[in-house]
Amino acid sequence: MNFQIAVIPGDGIGPEIINEAIKVLETIGKKYHHHFHFQKLLAGGCAIDKVGTCLPDETLDLCKKSDSILLGAVGGPKWDTLPGEQRPEKALLRLRKELNLFANLRPALLFPQLKDACPLKKEIVGNGIDICVVRELTGGIYFGEKGRKSSDIMGEIAYDVESYSVSEIKRIAKIAFEIAGKRKKKVTSVDKANVLESSKLWRSVVEEIANDYPDITLHHMYIDNASMQLIRDPKQFDVIVTSNMFGDILSDEASIITGSIGMLPSASLGNSTLGMYEPIHGSAPDIAGKNKANPIATILSAAMMLRYSFNLNKEAQAIEDAVTKVLKQGYRTPDLIHTEMQLVSTKEMGEQIIKNI
Ligand SMILES: NC(=O)c1ccc[n+]([C@@H]2O[C@H](COP(=O)([O-])OP(=O)(O)OC[C@H]3O[C@@H](n4cnc5c(N)ncnc54)[C@H](O)[C@@H]3O)[C@@H](O)[C@H]2O)c1
Ligand SMILES: CC(C)[C@H](C(=O)O)[C@@H](O)C(=O)O
Ligand SMILES: [Mg+2]
């Protein structure tokens, strides 16, 4: 089959990790007789430098017309002083919003071979950690009213408003319950309902949706406690459903218990098969251009693309199996390294994964 993939390498380590994911997809294409057509597009800081805007119209148009989008990372210190609207990260937010990609799945899976790279004690990790964070992606404080104003008494004031509608909460809650139905049948909804009005609505709507899923257990947890419980006893979680900002923070926290933020992929989905797939990490300016970045999160994001946008399940599994094999063989990028392991670069990690497909 033929698939049109819009590729946004972006900034920092973005182009390095994307190259490895493309090579992996090409290998899958050859093996299973699919034609993946890649179209590289500009967005982020590199687009600001080249054409003066973080998300050129052409990029947005071509993303809309493609079958799926693969993104590396955007942003970096070079553009940090730009006003909010002009920052590279705005490209990401606009893509998510314009394509209505409201559901962000961030699976935090500790590969058994990486138990030594997990900072938690062995007795806490037990047989392994397998959590799916379902992050609401097109609402909340990221997209509420924001601005600056000045007051005679307080001087300059900046504000960002968190708001959620019933329909926004319903659609993300449904996705979380559907996913939990295929897993361990447990949803933990994370909010701050003891303080925030938007969280109170969140909690009541999630409870209403839970009535349609009698075989799924629902727990509510405040974000402060959830941040602590994730380290104290991560095995208690199956699916975590939460708002845009809480999901952003909790997923970075969850990633480190899988060994490295370089291990966590994501899928951003809406109402059609068009999805955007990206690692959860950023452009990692501290290691950019050094061939040191872990490409696995991006490669696993490509696997999620095959599964969710193209319904190519055995092909996705082939990538995931190859990652497992490479980890078994002892290959590690610097973020995962510990004793008696084979240190490899970004490129070498990609090559080893390809060899194992
Ligand atoms: N999706 C995105 O495009 C995205 C996501 C997060 C942050 N950002 C942007 O990236 C820039 C840097 O942000 P940050 O430093 O807060 O977060 P970051 O995720 O880029 O880096 C945090 C730390 O994790 C390490 N790291 C990240 N990815 C890695 C990988 N694949 N392999 C090995 N180590 C890895 C980095 O070296 C750094 O030490 C900022 O401009 C931020 O806005 C973009
Ligand atoms: C870069 C930033 C806008 C983005 C977010 O906060 O959503 C990132 O941190 C992520 O996790 O994808
Ligand atoms: Mg983030």
Image (cartoon, rainbow, N blue to C red):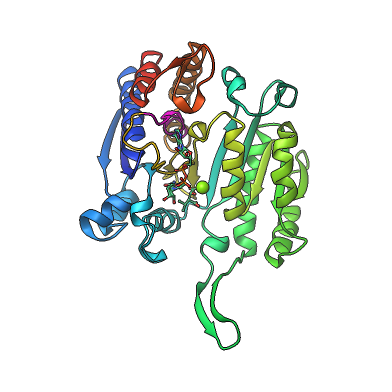
The residue lying toward the viewer, choosing from 155 and 242, is: 155
In which of the image's four quarters is ligand 1 placed?
Answer: top left
From the viewer's perspective, tell me whether residue 10 is left or right of residue 249.
left
Percent across and percent down for residue 306 are: 43, 32
In the rendered image, which quarter is residue 12 located in? top left
- Residue name at image x 71 percent, y 65 percent: 196
Is residue 129 placed above or below 96 in the rendered structure? above
Q: Magenta region's main secondary structure?
A: helix
Is residue 24 placed above or below 329 in the rendered structure? below
How many numbered discs, if any? 0
Is residue 42 placed above or below 330 in the rendered structure? below
Quadrant for the N terminus in the image: top left
Q: Does residue 303 show up magenta in the picture?
A: yes
Percent across and percent down for residue 94 are: 41, 58
From the viewer's perspective, tell me whether residue 167 is left or right of residue 216.
left
The residue lying toward the viewer, choosing from 109 and 256, is: 256
* Residue 19 in sight from this viewpoint: yes
Percent across and percent down for residue 357 are: 40, 16
From the viewer's perspective, tell me whether residue 171 is left or right of residue 85.
right
- Residue name at image x 78 percent, y 45 percent: 219
Per the rendered image, the range of residues in magenta is 292-304
